[in-house]
Image: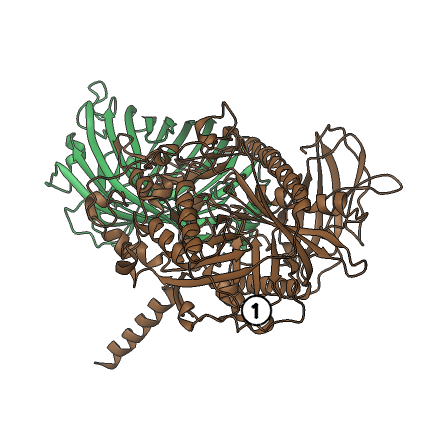
């Protein structure tokens, strides 16, 4: 482990500062719910460690990573869970890769995500039968007050259809002195345009019940850049509150026989950023 | 109380004490009663000490925009003039290339010089040029140590280093005391300064008017400044020849030290450094015909600041860089990770362009004001006299404890306009609107007419929701509580030394009050001057009318609208009680209880170990700039580790001919030394010299290595 850490650190330090940059990012997030594309996949205490590495040229970057979804609570029968009512904790593994193009304040991404489910479908979990792959493209831009993003997702394996997501980040406060702190509001909305029931393929899995809006989310978050790691990186601590208005029957599911129109949950996380991206931060 | 609780309580107390701000109690040291000397004549002595710290310190004065120093351009000095009369009275004037003055350093220096040279706090003035490219971390109030730049904290090593160096320079000036002749004079310098908060100034009653000698056609913000460059020329008797030779000067001119934009990351003496050196070189080369004037000039020009609170140098708009702005950091922002936020800096190209424009402006303005200083110095040669009456009065005001009797607010408060910065250096939050829609007053000139009480009109942070609670809980305790005020008599001039930044109109009123006080007491004063940034720092002093406008200066007038008038009354009282030949009562310098902020190791510490001889790794030219990489000293070294000033430059650029003519060194505005790395505890520097003119050069470390010759094709330099 120490050897791996030394290698990563060495690579990051040795990376040329301006032309091409290597970056690495490790996140550990913990929250009261795991929600993906507006659909609640697990309730209770959920931990999500993730690791990403990237290689950046002046405008273009290639990035990839993995994220694991652990359910830390004991799950009872009927509760919303990916693992099911077993002793397992790992519910899902996701692997992603993407290419990004930065043109001024605008960022264009194209990528792929592989979802691998580790739950036991026999005890109410999500098993490997739902393993699937999505490709996606997104467009983001940054202005002084509003940072909108539009994403298009396409399930190319199991569901075979599209889902659109629009989100908006609004910074409220940026503390100008170190350690820098930020307060921001995040809003998002999902739109199902092809991941619902398909009359032509009635046996196919679906993610949503109907075409149209799936959910509207609103969150408030804070971020504190806590510790500088020598000259190669930063640690950021964040926490926040999110709420979601559920509009599709799939987003309302909250366990067997339980439905909720509104979800509210807390989350917190730590991010360690190393290498080029960290050096770019002022 | 259980044992467990007691342990918890003790641990909590220790943790709180460790995290809390540092508190200091600083006693005062008065001058002993003067002992008449054997010489009845006026004597003067000069001293100078290099106070350039190593990289890593914060460049104070621009709040969050103040960068961490990466190196230095024009070195920082503290210059000293000591005047002594036949009655044994001594006055020491210090002008340091620093951003703010500090009552803490003043008291510490006085404690040393009172013992060694008979110069206590009441006979010592430590003023600063207010360069915003100077180090922080030595101030008397936590607010200025912890929020003066992006490098936060109070460092006792900075206090100790400045104290030792300045005290040594005062001692050297006392040792240099020689019979002297002096002359006072003044001259108007127009067009190089401007009023930066004109709408606030125009609120004054009666409205300000331009002096009759203001050039016709000058824009209002340029015509309403106080253009006076006041100077005391000093000639000393040469020990060998017995003749009096020009030796230096003490000048006062109102101008912020903000030629450098906040994006500057180098220690630099700013415009004031150019003015100081221009007169010093003139005295050495043109008047005294010194053939080898050396790396450090022999003449000494103390160039102090006046009532510069609302006065900016006439920098062009292109010299101010864009500010970092809040943006999403596209850092490995994968589909499952949260967005990270960041202050995104402008591009390197943009920063390079505006820093270049700032350097050009510094040179142009510095040369112009310097030419005025040279002309005035030369003109005063015909008015020299060996008579100069010396006197002083001194008081320490306890602002919180005596607020009622002083007529000021009992609790200091920062206006929101302070947070957004002045016109010279707005901060990144200037103009910010909530959700981009709602104006929350983050701009200058946004008074809040609903604020009740003593600080009426001062819009404070989130006062709509919390009133003055945030200020009471988090801010006011970090602001200064004392003011050391002094009035000097130097011949027919009375000088009010004020620990703050006095606006033009407030300064005019203070001068009138001082003159009235002095004349009422029978002092034959012909003029009064304001010496700002002296013996401490407690923000700005705007008039009551300017205060209501809540521009930067009004927002930073900490003790309310009556503060400037209070200082006017104090100066009048002190001008009426100027004394000489005596010692002051102890209550003139009561102990100061200071809260100086978070104590941190900021100034790099020597770690020991052998430092190899300096070497030049490579040198090359690109366009009009010569570059070199060199290893020079240890990473924690001050440019001058021992002694008062360096005997020679650390690095030079020479023409590659037989004579090796020196064309630049590490005190040249066109030469920058930036620390590239601290590898192995050594300092690895990046040298840039933008003065090439189509010749072949070498980079040389005096007494050491020399680079291979470099052919450069650039054309011309700024000067």
Q: Is residue B604 visible?
A: no
| A220 sits left or right of A233 in the view | left
Residue A81: image location, x then y, percent: 22, 45
Residue B331: image location, x then y, percent: 44, 38
Q: Quadrant of residue A20 in the image?
A: top right
Query: Which of the two residues, A101 or B566, is positioned nearer the viewer here?
Result: B566
Name the residue at the top extreme: A200
In the rendered image, the quadrant that contains the N terminus of chain B is: bottom left
Q: Which chain is brown?
A: B
Residue B332: image location, x then y, percent: 43, 38
| B176 sits left or right of A46 in the view | right
Q: Secondary structure at mark 1?
A: helix
Q: Quadrant of residue B716 in the image?
A: top right
Q: Which residue is mark 1?
A: B113
**Vertical relation: B162 (above or below) B70:** below
**Vertical relation: B502 (above or below) B483:** above
User: What color was chain A assigned in the picture?
Assistant: green
At horizontal 78% and vertical 52% (from top left) the residue drawn is B702
In the rendered image, the quadrant that contains the C terminus of chain B is: top right
Chain where mark 1 sits: B
Query: Which of the two residues, B482 or B336, is positioned nearer the viewer here?
Result: B482
The color scheme shown is by chain
């Amino acid at each position: 482990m120490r050897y791996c850490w030394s290698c990563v650190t060495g690579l990051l330090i040795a990376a040329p500062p301006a032309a091409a940059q290597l970056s690495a990012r490790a996140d550990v997030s913990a929250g009261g719910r795991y929600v993906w594309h507006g659909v609640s996949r697990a309730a209770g205490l959920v931990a999500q460690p993730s690791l990403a590495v990237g290689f950046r040229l002046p405008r273009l970057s290639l990035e990839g990573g993995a994220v694991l979804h652990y359910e830390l609570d004991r799950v009872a029968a009927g509760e919303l869970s990916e693992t099911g009512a077993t002793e397992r904790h790992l519910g899902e593994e996701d692997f992603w890769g993407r290419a990004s193009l930065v043109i001024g304040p605008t960022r264009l991404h194209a990528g792929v995500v592989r979802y691998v489910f580790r739950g036991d479908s026999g005890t109410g979990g999500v098993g490997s039968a739902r393993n699937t792959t999505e490709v996606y493209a997104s467009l983001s831009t940054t202005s002084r007050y509003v940072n909108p993003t539009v994403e298009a997702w396409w399930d190319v394996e199991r569901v075979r259809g599209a889902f659109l997501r629009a989100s908006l980040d609004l910074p409220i406060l940026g503390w100008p002195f170190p350690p820098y702190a930020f307060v921001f509001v995040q809003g998002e909305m999902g739109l199902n345009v092809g991941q619902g029931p398909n009359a032509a393929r009635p046996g196919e899995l679906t993610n949503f019940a109907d075409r149209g809006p799936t959910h509207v989310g609103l969150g408030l978050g804070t971020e504190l850049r806590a510790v500088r790691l020598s000259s190669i990186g930063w640690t950021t601590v964040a926490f926040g509150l999110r709420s979601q208005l559920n509009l599709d029957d799939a987003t309302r599911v909250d366990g067997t026989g339980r439905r909720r129109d509104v979800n509210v949950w807390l989350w917190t996380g730590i991010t360690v950023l190393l290498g080029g991206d960290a050096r770019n931060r002022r | 109380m259980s044992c467990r609780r007691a342990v918890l309580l003790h641990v909590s107390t220790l943790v709180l004490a460790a995290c809390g701000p540092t508190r200091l109690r600083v006693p005062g040291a008065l001058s002993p009663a003067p002992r008449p000397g054997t010489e009845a004549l006026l004597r003067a002595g000069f001293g100078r000490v290099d106070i350039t710290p190593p990289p890593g310190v914060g460049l104070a004065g621009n709040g969050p925009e103040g960068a961490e120093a990466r190196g230095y351009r024009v070195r920082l000095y503290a210059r000293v003039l000591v005047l002594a009369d036949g009655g044994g009275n001594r006055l020491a004037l210090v002008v340091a290339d620093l951003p703010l003055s500090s009552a803490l350093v003043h008291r510490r220096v006085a404690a040393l010089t009172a013992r060694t040279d008979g110069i206590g706090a009441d006979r010592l003035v430590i003023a600063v040029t207010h360069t915003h490219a100077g180090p922080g971390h030595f101030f008397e109030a936590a607010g200025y140590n912890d929020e003066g730049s992006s490098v936060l904290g109070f460092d006792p090593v900075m206090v100790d280093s400045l104290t030792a160096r300045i005290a040594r320079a005062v001692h050297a000036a006392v040792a240099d005391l020689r019979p002297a002749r002096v002359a006072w004079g003044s001259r108007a310098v127009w067009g190089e300064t401007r009023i930066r908060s004109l709408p606030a100034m125009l609120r004054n009653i009666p409205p300000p008017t331009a002096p009759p000698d203001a050039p016709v056609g000058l824009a209002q913000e340029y015509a309403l400044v106080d253009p006076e460059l006041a100077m005391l020329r000093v000639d000393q008797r040469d020990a060998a020849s017995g003749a009096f030779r020009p030796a230096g000067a003490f000048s006062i001119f109102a101008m912020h030290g903000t030629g450098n934009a906040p994006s500057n990351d180098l220690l630099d003496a700013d415009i004031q450094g150019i003015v100081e050196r221009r007169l010093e070189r003139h005295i050495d080369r043109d008047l005294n015909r010194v053939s080898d004037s050396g790396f450090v000039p022999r003449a000494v020009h103390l160039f102090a600041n006046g009532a510069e609170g609302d006065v900016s140098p006439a920098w062009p708009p292109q010299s101010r860089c864009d500010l970092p702005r809040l943006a999403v950091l596209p850092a490995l922002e994968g589909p499952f990770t949260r967005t990270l936020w960041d202050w995104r800096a402008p591009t390197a190209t943009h920063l390079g362009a505006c820093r270049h424009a700032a350097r050009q402006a510094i040179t142009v303005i510095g040369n112009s004001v310097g030419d005025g200083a040279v002309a005035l110095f030369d003109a005063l040669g015909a008015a020299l006299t060996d008579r100069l009456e010396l006197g002083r009065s001194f008081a320490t005001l306890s602002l919180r404890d005596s607020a009622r009797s002083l007529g000021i607010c009992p609790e200091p408060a920062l206006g929101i306009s302070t947070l957004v910065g002045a016109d010279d250096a707005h901060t990144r939050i200037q103009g910010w609107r909530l959700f981009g829609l709602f104006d929350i007053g983050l701009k200058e000139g946004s008074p809040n007419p609903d604020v009740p009480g003593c600080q009426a009109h001062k819009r404070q942070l989130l006062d709509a929701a919390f009133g003055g609670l945030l200020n009471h809980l988090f801010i006011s305790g970090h602001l200064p509580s004392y003011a050391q005020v002094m009035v000097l008599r130097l011949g027919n001039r009375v000088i009010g030394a004020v620990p703050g930044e006095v606006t033009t109109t407030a300064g005019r009123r203070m001068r009138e009050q001082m003159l009235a006080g002095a004349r009422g007491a029978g002092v034959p004063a012909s003029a009064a001057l304001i010496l700002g940034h002296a013996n401490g720092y407690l923000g700005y002093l705007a008039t009551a009318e300017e205060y209501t406008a809540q521009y930067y200066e009004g927002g930073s007038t900490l003790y309310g609208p009556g503060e400037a008038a209070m200082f006017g009354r104090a100066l009048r009282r002190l001008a009426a009680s100027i004394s000489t030949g005596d010692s002051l009562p102890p209550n003139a310098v009561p102990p100061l209880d200071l809260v100086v902020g978070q104590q941190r190791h900021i100034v790099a510490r020597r770690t020991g170990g052998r430092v190899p001889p300096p070497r030049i790794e490579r040198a090359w030219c690109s366009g009009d700039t010569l570059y070199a990489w060199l290893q020079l000293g240890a990473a924690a070294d001050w440019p001058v580790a021992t002694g008062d000033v360096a005997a020679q430059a650390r690095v030079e650029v020479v023409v590659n001919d037989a004579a090796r003519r020196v064309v630049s060194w590490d005190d040249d505005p066109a030469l920058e030394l930036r620390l590239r790395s601290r590898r192995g505890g050594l300092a690895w520097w990046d040298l840039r010299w933008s003065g090439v003119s189509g010749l072949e050069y070498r980079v040389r470390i005096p007494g050491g290595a020399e680079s291979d010759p470099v052919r450069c094709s650039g054309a011309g330099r700024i000067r």
